[in-house]
Image: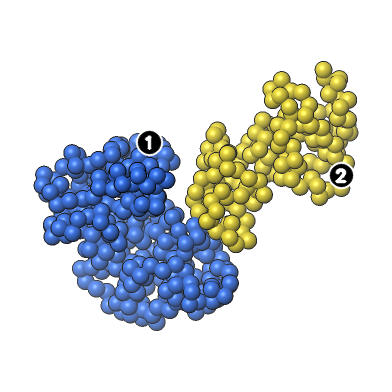
Chain colours: A yellow, B blue
Amino acid sequence: MEKAKQLSVSAIKNGTVIDHIPADSLFTVITILGLEHISNQITFGTNLESKKFGKKAIIKVSEVYFTEEEINKIALVAPAARLNIIRNYEVVEKHELTLPDKIEGIARCFNPTCITNHEPIKTRFSIISQKPLRLKCHYCEKITDEEHLTII
Amino acid sequence: MNSLASKSLVSINDFSPDEIERILDMASRFEQSPPGKILDSKVIAALFFEPSTRTRLSFESAVNRLGGRIIGFAEAGTSSVSKGESLKDTVLTVSNYSDLIVMRHSIEGSARYASEISPVPVINAGDGSNQHPTQTLLDLYSIQKTQGTLDGLNIFMVGDLKYGRTVHSLLMALSNYNTTFNFISPTELRMPEEYKLFLEKKGIKYYEHDDFTEIISRADIVYMTRVQRERFSDPLEYEKVKNIYVLRKEMLANTKENLKILHPLPRVNEIDRDVDDSPKAYYFEQALNGVYVRQAIISSILDVL
Ligand SMILES: [Zn+2]
């Protein structure tokens, strides 16, 4: 099994591997990390079989190491994701994700009469609960839950 | 050191319990002996993007009695806002002309945003369904003044507890004072879960009812709010419940001596007119208290004492 997976998404020499992303969140994760704007080599695979998730996705980015702040942003949509730091084809560090207390500019406030949906303002939320996910808007103070969550 | 100097008041949580206490004490001093023209040479901008005659007049009276000047507009239709100016541009422009901005807006979060971009402090006079902290402070003042304390009271909140921002902010503020809450509302307009969870976390007792004729004898404060027809998805449901949440004079028969009836006003028909004569009716004095409380807030923020 391990071998087959290795083949489906080729190995990188140095960089970051993000594994255990739910397949339907792959493109959101790409957007959150801004991967469409970088020129490094990126390979990804999706709809891979996973015992835990059914279908999972994996992203491998060459020569890029994310800051904790950057990577924690994806915890919103892929809380079970794992981060592996690769050096010379070896995994040298493994990280689990932790959701930050506050997030900025990632999610949209679900309240249509919130100021952030009327003026060009960066959204700000405090995370008041992780399971179930509940974000409190810094501006309108209303709570956006998982069902109403949209990523900008 | 006055910790309120130059501070904005957007949400009731922006003020600590200590700061709230100081505002209430100062309002009480102002009520007993008016402080004179302490706002002389100060200019306060009142930006009412959404009309609210009652709140605006209360602020104007508060400022005028202290010798300050008020500039601004009473509705967005007569201002540059109607020409499509952004909130940011309006706030930045007006902040050049004033020492303090009081604003009311139908969009939630507008006051927080204004307070972040404005070089002068901002007082939120209502942002949509979100916050109206000067109302909360005048409610607290009215409760303290009539009960002699904020501690250990039995507070009844009646009517629309789902959308009523005044009851939500008052609940948050009173949760610091060992309050017992009784929530009386139609099923569709119950107190939202988040506020009940908040009380549970703080270990505050609350009870929910759909009628209050039987239990009103226990209340120290009955806080009435309006049940609006348009809040119901089913109009028949409104017809069924509309008379349950009306306070009538005969209901006051066996109530406590110290009971006071509060209402944020304007009232429609949720309090019968014949209740007005009862010494337990307090809603008009409550409105007057708003002037002292707003004077205390403005004086503290402008640090004129
Ligand atoms: Zn919002």
Residue at the outermost bottom position: B41
Q: Amino acid at mark 1?
A: Glu
Element type where label 1 sits in the image: helix
Q: Position of residue B228 (x, y in %)?
A: 35, 53
Q: Position of residue B200 (x, y in %)?
A: 37, 36
Q: Residues within 10 Å of mark 1 (few under 14, many from 20)?
A: few
Q: Amino acid at mark 2?
A: Asn
Residue, disc 2: A40
Residue, disc 1: B200
Q: Does any portion of residue B16 appear in the rendered image?
A: no
Determine whether B205 is above or below B79 in the image.
above
Q: What residue is rendered at 20% in x and 47% in y? A: B220
Residue at the outermost front position: B236
Determine whether A2 is above or below A118 in the image.
above
Q: A119 left or right of B206?
A: right
Element type where label 2 sits in the image: loop
Q: Position of residue A125 (x, y in %)?
A: 56, 48
The image quarter in which residue B117 lies:
bottom right
* Residues at marks 2 and 1, CA–CA distance in whole angstroms: 51 Å
Q: Position of residue B8 (x, y in %)?
A: 45, 63
Quadrant containing the N terminus of chain B in the rendered view = bottom left
**Frontmost residue, B45 versus B237:** B237
Quadrant containing the C terminus of chain B in the rendered view = bottom left
The image quarter in which residue A115 lies:
bottom right
Q: A39 left or right of B293?
A: right
Q: What residue is rendered at 51% in x and 74% in y? A: B95
Q: A117 left or right of B5?
A: right
Q: Residues within 10 Å of mark 2 (few under 14, many from 20)?
A: few
Determine whether B17 is above or below B9 in the image.
above
> Which chain is disc 1 placed on?
B
